[in-house]
Image (tube, helix red, strand yellow):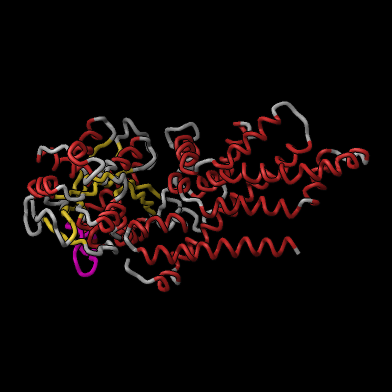
Amino acid sequence: MKLSPFFLALFVALLGRATIAADPPAPQSIILASTTSVENSGLLAHILPSFTKETGITVHVLAQGTGQALQTAARDDADLVLVHDPEAEEKFIAAGDGIDRRQIAWNDFIVVGPRSDPAHIAGTHDAVAAMQAIASARAPFVSRGDKSGTDALEHRLWRVAEIDPVKAGGGSWYRDIGGGMGAALNAAQAMNAYTISDRGTWLSFGNKGDLAVLVEGDPRLLNRYDVILLNPAKHPVPKQDLARRFAQWLLSPEGQAAIGAYTVHGEQLFYPSASHPK
Amino acid sequence: MGDDVWTVLGTAEFKRIVALSLTVSVSATAVAAVLGLPGGAALAICRFPGRRLLILLANAFLGLPPVVVGLALYLVLSRSGPLGALSLLFTPGAMVAAQTVLATPIITALVHRAIEEPWQEYGGALRVDGATPLRSIRILLAISRRSVLTAVLAGFGRTISEVGAVLIVGGNIAGYTRIMTTAIVLKTSEGELGLALGLGLVLIGISITVSASAFVLWDK
């Protein structure tokens, strides 16, 4: 448009100064890049007020998939991450981006699907066998396809099952929607399809329709949530100290108790595990 | 979670979401109007090199995809981007910037069109009168005030209804950058479809109210 780059920069700078927020940012705030499962399940909204009350630090939560959250942090746009994909986390740390990974809680993944259950997997406890049964029944399956922690788990299961789902059913029964957990559950509900969900999102999801939990209890379905700080050597993030205080609070008896106390419809969503990592 | 629409509408969080939606969109529309009203009028009455190109660009950018604007602005405002030092990413300021980029071409192009005809009609008289270009712009904008209002309302309509750009540069942070459209996306993903639809109806109501009030006040 008609703006010189200088004018544009000036304008953006002025915007930065303007207090246009309905609620001006607290003097001390950090950005936590996290996954949809901890934010949309209501866990963070439940535990953050006590941390803010105690320390005066406001935590701004970005609810993204694990892959996107790690990317955001790698670009210096977040101060710490809370994610759930062990392989991606190890890469993040190996690349020199992250330090001090600590597990704060766990729950599990579940295979959900229509009650009619065309692949006959209800009540079983072997996730890999369930994936094989879905593939051989050519039953509709919704994949996140968004490089989230849940998406990574799904692809690990296909690998163990020695099935390439895109080759076997791409464009027909295997439906990669490229969306979040909620979008995948909405799609599975609408298409009478199977999908894999973390238990937190499932329990707080409001549009279950005919979907039910069909497979659970496989140790391969363990879902660990880790907090990771940014490596100051590579990321001169000015709020490292505040981020560390938040990570320490999550690991403290008080933070752990707050995590364990969160329930939806009377069910506990996350099991604190700082002292006994799974 | 699982609350019905009426309970949610009464909460402080909801009021903050509505207030922020309006603040961000009205601010962006105001900045776009400050740029687009004189800009569009100048394109109609002044002759300078590159003028035709600017007119073409303003019209071409009428269909600027919000998600692309959001992504481009994300890369610019990222801490590792060229304007990262401003720490503007994931703030309401970034959302205003994104919506301003979307609304400015709309207001500019529509104002240019609105001023073209009166300029042909009154331009000669204004020149004989010795009016400076700045004065001519003021007079022509006043003559075309109805079309100008429509241009500004079209800009506002774009900003208040847009979700792609603000989701990327704002981050939909609860209590800080969450607005009506991003809250609707969130509630849909939580499977709270009734609540999402309720919020959607409220958004439509707000948008209609603002536009209708502006129209009535301006057009009397």
Q: Quadrant of the N terminus of chain A?
A: top right
Residue A135 x/y as whole percent:
14, 45
In the displayed structure image, the side of residue A268 where residue B105 appears, left or right: right
Residue A12 position (above or below residue B187): above
Residue A155 x/y as whole percent:
18, 41
Viewer-proximal residue, B56 or A233?
B56
Measuring 16% from the left and 54% from the top, which residue is drawn there?
A: A110
Measuring 56% from the left and 61% from the top, which residue is drawn there?
A: B207
Q: How many marks?
A: 0
Residue B201 position (above or below residue A194): below
Task: Decide if residue A225 is in sight here.
Answer: yes
Task: Decide if residue A227 is in sight here.
Answer: no
Viewer-proximal residue, A46 or B46?
B46
Measuring 86% from the left and 44% from the top, which residue is drawn there?
A: B122
Residue A92 x/y as whole percent:
25, 35
Q: Is residue A76 magenta?
A: no
Q: Residue furthest right?
A: B128
Measuring 60% from the left and 40% from the top, which residue is drawn there?
A: A11
Residue B166 x/y as whole percent:
47, 48
Q: Is residue A267 magenta?
A: yes
Viewer-proximal residue, B31 or B82?
B31
Residue A237 position (above or below residue B22): above
In the displayed structure image, the side of residue A135 where residue B34 appears, left or right: right
Determine which quarter of the picture holds residue B59. top right
Q: Which portion, as a residue range, is magenta? A: A259-272
In the displayed structure image, the side of residue B148 where residue A156 appears, left or right: left
